[in-house]
Image (spheres, rainbow, N blue to C red):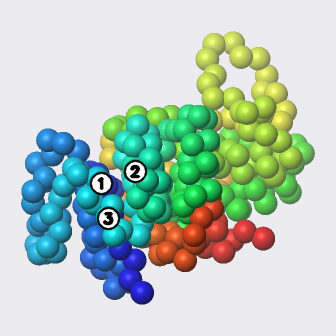
């Protein structure tokens, strides 16, 4: 059975990648395409920019878009995502959330909503990054003494949150491997005379520039050696394909909060 998908932010880079992914997947149907009020795409066919006539018109009318939909996929901003979350709750529509930058209160609302309707919530929908998260945790368990852990990430100049949601998730995985909570061991900035590096801390370094889609490296620096685990994304298609895989996964789930490790069957 096909999954009826609603894509938000279709004028954005991720929105366009998601549309292209839906058009290429025989198990998915584009049910609706949403964009902000004032967008130049409002009123156009959602496939126009790809030379495809889909019969789906880009709209800002969320309530109408959700009627008869199975899953909404969102990669926009936290404030917009929370509005979509409320609307999906009211309409009984499941949701894939790839948006990052949520605060703790917003994360709690997502968890509460998932008790009614299934949600996949992950800071990175890439299959490769999902595997990376598991590797980072396992490496931290092995390299737990005598190794300093640093998370380095780089994104394009337009990214508005730092560190990236993926970098934070990698930090959480490393902390779990050490048997710690990230909030108790994270160091997000260093400036001036900081003193020697404290053992057991997890450092973060954020780089921004150009059109970098997303580079993440976790460094385990020991005495006489350094282990580095790296993922580099060269196209947003990898995130779109992972998110659409998550949408199909949700079609069989009535409720619950899931991440990409659930989608890929990597949880023990």
Disc on res. 67: 3
Per the model, the C-alpha gap separating discs 1 and 2 is 7 Å
Q: Position of residue 11 (x, y in %)?
A: 22, 52
* Front position in the image: 264 or 59: 59
Q: Is 46 situated above or below 182?
A: below
Q: Which residue is mark 2?
A: 87
Residue 161 in view: yes
CA neighbours of label 3 inside 10 A, class few (<14), some (14 to 19), many (20+): some
Q: Secondary structure at mark 2?
A: helix
Position of 256 with respect to 88 (left or right) is right
Q: Position of residue 214 (x, y in %)?
A: 45, 51
* Label 3 with label 1: CB-CB less than 8 Å: yes
**Residue 58's image quarter?**
bottom left
Q: Secondary structure at mark 1?
A: helix
* Label 1 with label 2: CB-CB less than 8 Å: yes
- In the rendered image, the quadrant that contains the N terminus is bottom left
Q: Is 267 situated above or below 184?
A: below
């Amino acid at each position: 059975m096909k999954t009826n998908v609603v894509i938000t932010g279709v004028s954005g880079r991720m929105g366009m990648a998601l549309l292209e992914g839906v058009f290429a997947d025989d198990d998915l149907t584009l049910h609706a395409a949403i964009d902000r009020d004032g967008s130049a795409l409002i009123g156009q066919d959602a496939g126009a920019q790809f030379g495809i006539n889909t019969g789906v018109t880009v709209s800002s009318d969320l309530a109408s878009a959700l009627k008869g939909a199975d899953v909404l996929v969102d990669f926009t901003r936290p404030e917009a995502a929370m509005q979509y979350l409320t609307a999906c709750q009211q309409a009984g529509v499941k949701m894939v959330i790839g948006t990052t930058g949520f605060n703790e209160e917003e994360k709690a609302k997502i968890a509460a909503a998932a008790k009614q309707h299934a949600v996949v919530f992950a800071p990175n929908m890439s299959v490769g990054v999902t595997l990376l998260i598991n590797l980072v945790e396992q490496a931290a368990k092995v390299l737990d003494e005598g190794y300093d852990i640093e998370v380095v990430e780089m994104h394009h100049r337009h990214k508005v949150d730092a560190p990236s949601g993926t970098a934070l998730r990698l930090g959480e995985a490393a902390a779990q491997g050490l048997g710690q909570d990230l909030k108790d061991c994270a160091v997000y900035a260093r400036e001036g005379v900081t003193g020697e590096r404290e053992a057991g801390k997890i450092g973060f370094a954020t780089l921004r520039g150009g059109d970098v889609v997303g580079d993440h490296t976790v460094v385990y620096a020991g005495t006489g050696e350094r282990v580095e685990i790296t993922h580099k994304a060269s196209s947003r298609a990898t995130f779109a394909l992972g998110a659409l895989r998550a949408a199909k996964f949700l079609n069989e789930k009535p409720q619950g909060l899931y991440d990409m490790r659930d989608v890929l069957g990597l949880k023990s």
